């Protein structure tokens, strides 16, 4: 199981990058002047991207630790 | 550890306070519509901005920030005084919300409401970790899951109590009196509840494990640095977040809140009927928080929590489809219908006329539909028959009651599986001297951020071309699936018997 844990670490890093990219892309697409939904207003996106930035860094760090075999059993 | 009688005092004092904090947090949400009319009137860009900030910042930024601020304090000065402080801040803020004059007479009111709402979020961020840690540090090793699961019931019971208080106030006052001043009563009541809880908590002693560390001079001097600056602990914080609380947060939010929104907004169920059936399902399922907490002492925490996530991933779409099908009048055989049309000339002093078409239909299965379509006469004259606004209310026949309750109950059972054992799981993951700080942050990011984002992301997905009424579920399903994979691979199922154990126990079990 240890090799699976290790190489999935790279997947978690890629998931973190993709999640952040998708979030920023969604913000650019959906923010509209005069939109009535929360997803059309800039403020929720600013808050969400601000709070998600350290979270995606955390997921990438988790992936890095996994790749460095920090979570391997018997290490 | 504490005697059997002593532990129930500890659980009681901690749970009542946490329940009151949830009550305080929820009444703001439940009374959001009236708060918005009193403090954030429409058509004013500044108040609209402040309202959005109050909604999003309180859950997403301030809750995790509260976890850091009060977690640090709890690891420095102790659990007892820290979660007393969070209770005072929460109760004081809630009481003051009930005292602030409306925007019409006091234009600074929206700013004060925003500040008080942020203080509520801050206090909630600090409360849970303190209560869970305090109970766990009093509990014997073989009953830690069982005892901390009582804390886990408070989030559901807090919601329940808030709804009961609001309904009781509404029923005992006229609509005018309620809209004028009666809505303030649930906020003002908080001060009484909080004072009672403070008196109870003041009589409690400090956690024995923390008191021992303190007497030996072994408490942390910088809990934030030790929690997040040291790789050995930081990797456990990340594992707790991505392997447990992230999935737990979305399952919790979907089962307790998204299901309600889905029944009211997507299925258009009559609100009193839907809320009553949800209330019954919540009450029936609440004891399972304690059951799964108890079970986790016997078979481990990991298996139960991950089974809850997996079941949610597999069952969400069939369950929500079944709920939608039950309320979909297109699949029902119509027995009779009555259509009335009313014309309103020059509404809101415009030159147009409004045509209001009301359809009241009964179906063979006993269900009823009341649909109101509003058309603009000017638009109809251009050949466009699309209504400006449609409002549907479906009242289901009594024969659906237990079927729908069973579906909601199943959703809440998934919640109890992931949420019942989580406090004991988090407590056992971190050493005493930085436990409050280390466990609070992943819990509040998982619940406040990942869970709290469910409605926002669901809206985002449903406006995507090709989406349907179930598309919003892809967010909780996706997050729970990723969390399940991380949890099953990286977490150990070991139940840590000594809460002072090495932080690596969960990934490097000794046996």
Image (cartoon, coloured by chain):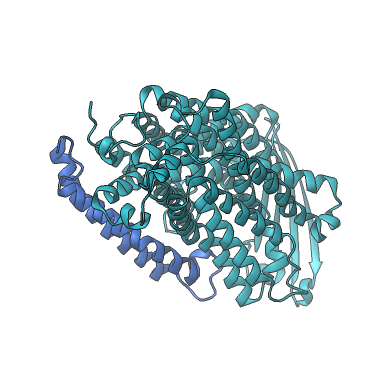
Chain colours: A blue, B cyan
Q: At 63% across and 62% down in the image, what residue appears?
A: B385
Residue B466 vs B381, above or below: the answer is: above
Counting from the top left corner in percent of width and height, residue B284 is at 60, 28
Q: Quadrant of the C terminus of chain B?
A: top left
Looking at the image, the residue that sits furthest to the top is B298
Q: Name which quarter of the figure residue A47 lies in.
A: bottom left
Counting from the top left corner in percent of width and height, residue B419 is at 46, 37
Residue B257 at least partly seen? yes
Question: Tag count in the figure?
Answer: 0
Residue B502 vs B220, above or below: the answer is: above
Horizontal arrangement in the rendering, residue B19 relative to residue B413 (left or right): right
Query: Is residue B391 or residue B499 the one in the foreground?
Result: B499
Counting from the top left corner in percent of width and height, residue B460 is at 45, 58
Horizontal arrangement in the rendering, residue B353 relative to residue B242 (left or right): right
Q: At 53% across and 58% down in the image, what residue appears?
A: B122
Residue B374 at least partly seen? no
Horizontal arrangement in the rendering, residue B143 relative to residue B196 (left or right): left
Residue B319 vs B44, above or below: the answer is: above
Counting from the top left corner in percent of width and height, residue A34 is at 54, 75
Query: Is residue B365 or residue B40 the one in the foreground?
Result: B40
Q: Name which quarter of the figure residue B426 lies in.
A: top left
Horizontal arrangement in the rendering, residue A17 relative to residue B151 (left or right): left
């Amino acid at each position: 199981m240890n090799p699976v844990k290790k190489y999935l670490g790279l997947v978690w890093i890629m998931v973190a990058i993709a999640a952040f990219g998708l979030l920023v892309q969604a913000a650019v697409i959906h923010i509209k002047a005069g939109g009535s939904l929360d997803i059309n207003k800039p403020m929720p996106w600013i808050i969400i991207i601000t709070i998600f930035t350290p979270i995606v860094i955390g997921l990438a760090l988790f992936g890095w630790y996994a790749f460095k075999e920090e979570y391997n059993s018997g290490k | 550890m504490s005697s059997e009688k002593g532990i129930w005092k500890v659980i009681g004092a901690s749970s009542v306070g946490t329940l009151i904090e949830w009550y305080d947090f929820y009444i703001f949400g439940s009374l959001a519509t009236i708060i918005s009319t009193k403090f954030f009137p429409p058509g004013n860009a500044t108040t609209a901005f402040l309202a959005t900030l109050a909604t999003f910042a309180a859950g997403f930024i301030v809750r995790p920030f509260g976890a850091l601020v009060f977690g640090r304090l709890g690891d420095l000065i102790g659990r007892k005084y820290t979660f007393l402080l969070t209770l005072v801040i929460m109760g004081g803020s809630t009481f003051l919300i009930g005292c602030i004059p409306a925007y019409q007479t006091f234009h600074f009111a929206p700013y004060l409401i925003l500040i008080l709402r942020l203080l509520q979020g801050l206090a909630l961020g600090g409360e849970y970790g303190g209560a869970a840690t305090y109970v766990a540090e009093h509990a014997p090793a073989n009953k830690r899951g069982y005892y901390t699961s009582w804390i886990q019931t408070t989030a559901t019971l807090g919601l329940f109590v808030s709804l009961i208080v609001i309904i009781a106030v509404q029923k005992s006052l006229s609509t005018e009196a309620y809209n004028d001043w009666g809505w303030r009563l649930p906020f003002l009541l908080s001060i009484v509840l909080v004072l009672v809880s403070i008196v109870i908590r003041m009589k409690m002693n400090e956690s024995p494990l923390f008191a021992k560390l303190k007497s030996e001079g072994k408490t942390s001097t910088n809990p934030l640095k030790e929690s997040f600056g040291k790789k050995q602990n930081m990797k456990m914080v990340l594992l707790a977040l991505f392997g447990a609380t992230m999935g737990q947060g979305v399952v919790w939010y979907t089962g307790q809140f998204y299901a309600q929104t889905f029944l009211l907004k997507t299925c258009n169920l009559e609100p009193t009927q839907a809320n009553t059936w949800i209330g019954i399902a919540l009450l029936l399922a609440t004891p399972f928080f304690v059951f799964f907490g108890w079970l986790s002492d016997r078979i481990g925490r990991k298996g139960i929590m991950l089974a809850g996530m997996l079941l949610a991933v597999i069952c969400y779409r069939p369950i929500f489809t079944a709920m939608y099908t039950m309320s979909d009048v297109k699949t029902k055989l119509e027995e009779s219908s009555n259509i009335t049309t009313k014309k309103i000339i020059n509404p809101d002093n415009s030159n147009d006329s409004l045509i209001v078409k009301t359809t009241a239909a009964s179906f063979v299965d006993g269900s009823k539909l009341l649909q109101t379509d509003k058309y603009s006469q000017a638009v109809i004259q251009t050949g466009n028959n699309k209504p400006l606004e449609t409002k549907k209310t479906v009242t289901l026949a009594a024969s659906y009651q237990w079927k729908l309750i069973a579906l909601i109950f199943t959703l809440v059972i998934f919640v109890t599986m992931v949420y019942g054992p989580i406090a004991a799981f988090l407590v056992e993951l971190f050493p005493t001297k930085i436990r409050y700080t280390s466990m609070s942050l992943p819990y509040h990011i998982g619940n406040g951020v990942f869970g709290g984002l469910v409605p926002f992301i669901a809206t985002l997905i449903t406006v995507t071309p090709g989406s349907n009424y179930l598309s919003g579920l892809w967010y909780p399903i996706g997050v729970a699936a990723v969390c399940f994979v991380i949890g099953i691979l990286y977490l150990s199922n070991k139940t840590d018997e000594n809460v002072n154990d090495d932080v690596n126990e969960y990934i490097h079990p000794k046996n």
